[in-house]
Image: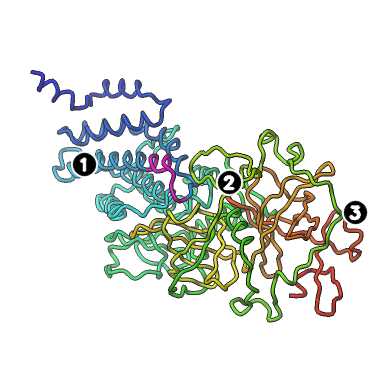
């Protein structure tokens, strides 16, 4: 009798009333506990011997709960760094497991219905196809955000779903979605949405901008077409090999084994890119935005969408295969520390396209000293920070690399707590004029994340260059592959201070970079805009007052500014001006106050 009772307890009560009651009793205040209970319920039901109608009804009843949980879980693996922290790893595992069980449930319904084909089977079959595309899209998003490789066979399953919808003429079948408004979307809509999202770099856009992109998805899908034949416009055409497990790729950029044109489709983004370019032309300001309905799209977001949904983001030069190792240091703090510990070699103009008269950057730069000021190692919070950060020392936020763990952070100026940073060895896979593709063991770097600033050098005698992580993912071999875009071919470690009330703040480690005609400062992301503020730049024993001209680049990890230069030739009046003066000393010992680059 007891054995029979235990057998009954192992099955989940899938009756609609019982399922709704179970959902109402879920501890929604605890994301972890709710996810756990939801997972175990799904796993039980997916193994139970029930009809496809009952299975589908159960899945449809509990699916909205996952819609509420997913954003909560995703925040733990959005904009994360490698190596992954324990909390991030757990969140990724829980999310992936939940999504997989939902997908398995809907796939079981599809398999049963297409095999048996009972009366009216196409309705439940098409609904299950619709849901498979939605949950597959979530899985792809989770894997991109956490730098994981795509699950083997996932793209093949996605393409199979679309093939079946085409074959049975179900692509226009619409069903309510799991959003708040419960809008209806078609299978064709969800397929196009999945494809467009798979081409985006979620980490590059950021959470806020991605939300705007999601809100405007009906507009993007409306201007996207699935074609049977490849068009001449290869710039805005992506190949979908429906018999493969290969993600969408730009037409003409990959060789595959499928020669039958009937097994291929082409995603055309021509109309979509015309629309985005139209929006871009209406934004005059560099940091401007455009309002579309209730949504705001910034100029940088539109440019990012254009780069993702067309061919224009491809490099102009072909990658060359690389061999050997490349040294890397990740993060401004670590780069600053390493560069201060070693003598830097002269700039090698032979490796770049800079003018022939370029000489050693460091020996050329002379910074005019300023009059001594009262040294004050406390930060003037009232002037430097935003209102929300008045009580927090900003330097403590940017100086320590906590990676994904929350650690107690002491005042970094105290003796004995400085972390010793070293460079790591990475394998050079290939390179182009603008950057590198490298491979590294995730556990050998302090912090590696999308948009991270990285110092890189090809050998011990080469100068360090500064580069930005543009993409990042785990390889099938277990290591991490990442792409770097070079931002500066040379770098100097400097400090900046903020002057207020006749005193100076604590020094903030920054980097001085060099890019053709620009002298740039790389600064950790701060909760305030430094543009227009009077700063003191320190390099070795040299000091200068500077203003930041304009922001060249902003990321979640760092900002890049041009240095504002004065046109006044009187160096004695430096302290009475609102602009800085950078002076170059040439071979005949005459001083010039013109742009530094005229002498390079």
Chief secondary structure of the magenta portion: helix
**Between marks 1 and 3 in the image, the one whose residue lies nearer the viewer:** 3
**Distance CA(mark 1)–CA(mark 2):** 49 Å
Question: According to the image, label 2 marks what residue?
Answer: 400
| Left or right side of 578 for 379 | left
Secondary structure category for the residue under label 2: loop
Pointer 3 or 2: first along the chain? 2
Mark 3 neighbour class, 10 Å CA radius: few under 14, some 14 to 19, many 20 or more: few
Q: Using the image, tell me which numbered label, if any, was put on residue 108.
A: 1
Secondary structure category for the residue under label 1: helix
Pointer 1 or 2: first along the chain? 1
Q: Is residue 84 magenta?
A: yes
Q: Compared to 528, does 11 lie above or below? A: above
**Distance CA(mark 3)–CA(mark 2):** 36 Å
In the image shown, does 241 or 595 lie closer to the viewer? 595
Count of numbered circles in the view: 3
Label 3–label 2 contact, CB within 8 A:
no
Q: Is residue 46 magenta?
A: no
Q: Quadrant of the C terminus?
A: bottom right
Question: According to the image, label 3 marks what residue?
Answer: 576
In the image shown, does 404 or 61 lie closer to the viewer? 404
Instruction: Provide the residue span drawn in magenta.
Output: 82-92
At horizontal 36% and vertical 46% (from top left) the residue drawn is 139
């Amino acid at each position: 009798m007891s054995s029979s009772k235990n057998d009954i307890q192992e099955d989940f009560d899938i009756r609609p009333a019982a399922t709704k009651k179970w959902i109402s009793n879920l501890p929604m205040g605890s994301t972890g506990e709710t996810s756990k209970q939801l997972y175990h319920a799904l796993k039980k039901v997916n193994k139970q011997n029930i009809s496809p109608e009952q299975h589908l009804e159960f899945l449809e009843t509990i699916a909205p709960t996952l819609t509420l949980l997913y954003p909560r879980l995703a925040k733990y693996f959005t904009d994360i760094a490698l190596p992954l922290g324990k909390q991030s790893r757990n969140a990724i595992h829980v999310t992936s497991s939940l999504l997989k069980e939902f997908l398995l449930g809907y796939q079981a319904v599809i398999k049963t219905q297409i095999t048996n084909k009972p009366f009216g089977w196409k309705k439940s079959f098409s609904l299950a196809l619709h849901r498979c595309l939605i949950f597959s899209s979530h899985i792809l998003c989770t894997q991109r955000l956490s730098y994981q490789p795509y699950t083997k066979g996932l793209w093949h399953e996605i393409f199979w779903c679309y093939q079946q919808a085409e074959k049975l003429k179900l692509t226009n079948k619409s069903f309510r979605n799991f959003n708040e408004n419960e809008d209806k979307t078609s299978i064709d809509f969800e397929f196009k949405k999945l494809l467009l999202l798979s081409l985006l770099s979620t980490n590059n856009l950021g959470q806020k901008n991605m939300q705007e992109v999601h809100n405007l998805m009906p507009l993007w899908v409306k201007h996207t077409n699935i074609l049977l034949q490849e068009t001449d416009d290869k710039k805005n055409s992506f190949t979908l090999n429906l018999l493969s497990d290969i993600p969408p790729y730009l037409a003409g950029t990959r060789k595959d084994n499928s020669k039958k044109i009937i097994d291929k489709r082409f995603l055309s983004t021509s109309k979509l890119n015309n629309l985005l370019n139209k929006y871009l032309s209406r934004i005059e300001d560099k940091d401007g935005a455009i309002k579309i309905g209730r949504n705001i799209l910034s100029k940088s977001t539109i440019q990012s969408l254009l780069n993702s949904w067309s061919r224009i983001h491809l490099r102009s030069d072909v990658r060359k295969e690389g061999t050997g190792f490349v040294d890397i240091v990740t993060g401004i703090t670590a780069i600053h520390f390493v560069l201060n510990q070693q003598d830097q070699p002269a700039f090698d103009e032979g490796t770049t396209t800079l003018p022939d008269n370029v000489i050693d950057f460091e020996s050329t730069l002379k910074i005019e000293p300023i009059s001594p000021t009262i040294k004050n190692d406390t930060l003037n919070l009232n002037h430097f920070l935003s209102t929300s950060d008045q009580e927090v020392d900003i330097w403590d936020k940017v100086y320590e690399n906590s990676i994904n763990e929350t650690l107690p952070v002491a005042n970094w100026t105290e003796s004995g707590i400085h972390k010793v940073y070293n460079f790591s060895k990475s394998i050079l896979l290939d390179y182009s004029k603008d950057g590198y593709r490298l491979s590294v063991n995730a556990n050998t770097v302090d912090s590696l994340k999308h948009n991270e600033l990285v110092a890189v050098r090809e050998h011990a005698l080469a100068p360090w260059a500064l580069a930005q992580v543009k993409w990042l993912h785990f390889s099938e071999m277990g290591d991490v592959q990442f792409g770097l875009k070079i931002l500066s071919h040379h770098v100097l470690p400097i400090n900046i201070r903020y002057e207020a009330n006749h005193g100076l703040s604590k020094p903030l480690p920054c980097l001085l970079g060099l890019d053709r005609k620009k002298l740039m400062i790389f600064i950790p992301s701060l909760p305030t805009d430094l543009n227009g503020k009077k700063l003191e730049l320190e390099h070795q024993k040299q000091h200068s007052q500077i203003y930041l001209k304009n922001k060249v680049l902003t990321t979640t990890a760092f900002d890049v500014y041009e240095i504002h230069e004065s046109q006044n030739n009187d160096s004695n009046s430096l302290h009475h001006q609102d602009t800085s003066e950078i002076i170059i000393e040439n071979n005949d010992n005459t001083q010039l106050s013109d742009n530094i680059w005229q002498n390079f």
